[in-house]
Amino acid sequence: MTVVVQAPATSANLGPGFDCLGLALEFRDRVTFEMADRTSVTVNGEGAGEVNRGPDHLILATVRRAFQECGQPVPDIAVHCENNIPHGRGLGSSSAAIVTGLAGARGLGARLDEADVLALATRIEGHPDNVAPALLGGLTISWMQGVSGRAVRLDPAAGLAATVAVPDDRLPTSTARSLLPDSVPFGDAVHVLGRSALAVAAFTSHPELLLPATEDRIHQSYRAQAYPQSLALVHELRERGIPAAISGAGPSVIAFGSGFPIPDGWRRLEVPLATEGVRVSGP
């Protein structure tokens, strides 16, 4: 039995939508699962030679968790990863791995209800803002209902595409979160409430409003010490009228425009938005 899963990169927050807005991007990790005599992992592309290929590999651990949640024995599998999503850059690589593991487990026979996949993915990841667009595609609004993740998917405006500037430096999400304050000024909270609501309209039907809709006041500046060059690029682009924000926890920058310079040594990815979430072929 062979199952092939492709999960998209994602960009969370999109400026003001901290921990609730996410967007799927059309470049994907591709993972092949096969029943085997013993469990193994091979990795090509991003993370090759770096990631743990033992039982704690995130995809393997997620497959194991899925079968355990269903009360089923965990099978031996061979997992082959073709990774395109940069690691530790704020583009949802861990969420893609989790979503891939859950989709692969279902394809291999885990009796996991589709309605519970987002909730389990959220429990593994800790928050739903990246796992939701990886699962559903498009623009997602996610929230916590008690201890469970929930999400609504919306179609992005036709023709909307992203330019992602990816630096060599990495930033673990845990480090980025440790820099956030326990509270923010009331005026800043009110500001991002309005801008995150505006962002929903801008990304779905009024892209001409993306510049004001992507303005943040509650997380990017607090993390400036972790990605000074990234935040400087965001400010530079916005001063030129280009909607831009830190992608997820950073340090990548996502912008909605093209033809602008990025710092030397950074990668430029110009990608359409992914209207489709995780793809599965096989049983």
Image (cartoon, rainbow, N blue to C red):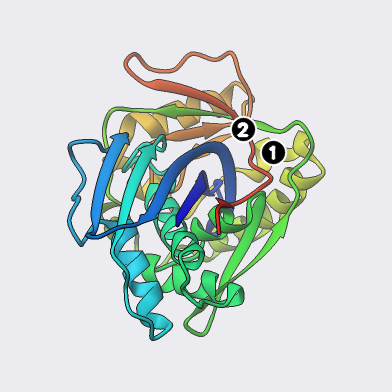
Task: Determine crowd level at label 2: few under 14, some 14-19, many 20+ residues with C-alpha closer than 10 A.
Answer: many
Residue at label 2?
A: 243
Quadrant position of residue 192:
bottom right
Q: Is residue 235 above or below residue 96?
A: above
Task: Determine crowd level at label 1: few under 14, some 14-19, many 20+ residues with C-alpha closer than 10 A.
Answer: many
Q: Position of residue 39 (x, y in %)?
A: 24, 59
Q: In the visual, does 14 lie left or right of 83?
A: right
Secondary structure beneath dot 2 equals loop
Q: Which mark is residue 124?
A: none
Q: Position of residue 97 (x, y in %)?
A: 39, 53
Secondary structure beneath dot 1 equals helix
At a point 57% along the width and 71% down the height, the residue shown is: 143
Q: Is residue 240 above or below residue 137?
A: above
Residue at label 1?
A: 210
Residue type at numbered disc 1? Leu
Quarter containing the C terminus: bottom right
Quadrant position of residue 197:
bottom right
**Number of on-image labels:** 2
Q: In the visual, does 30 lie left or right of 259?
A: left
Give the camera-side residue of 102 and 223.
Answer: 102
Residue type at numbered disc 2? Pro
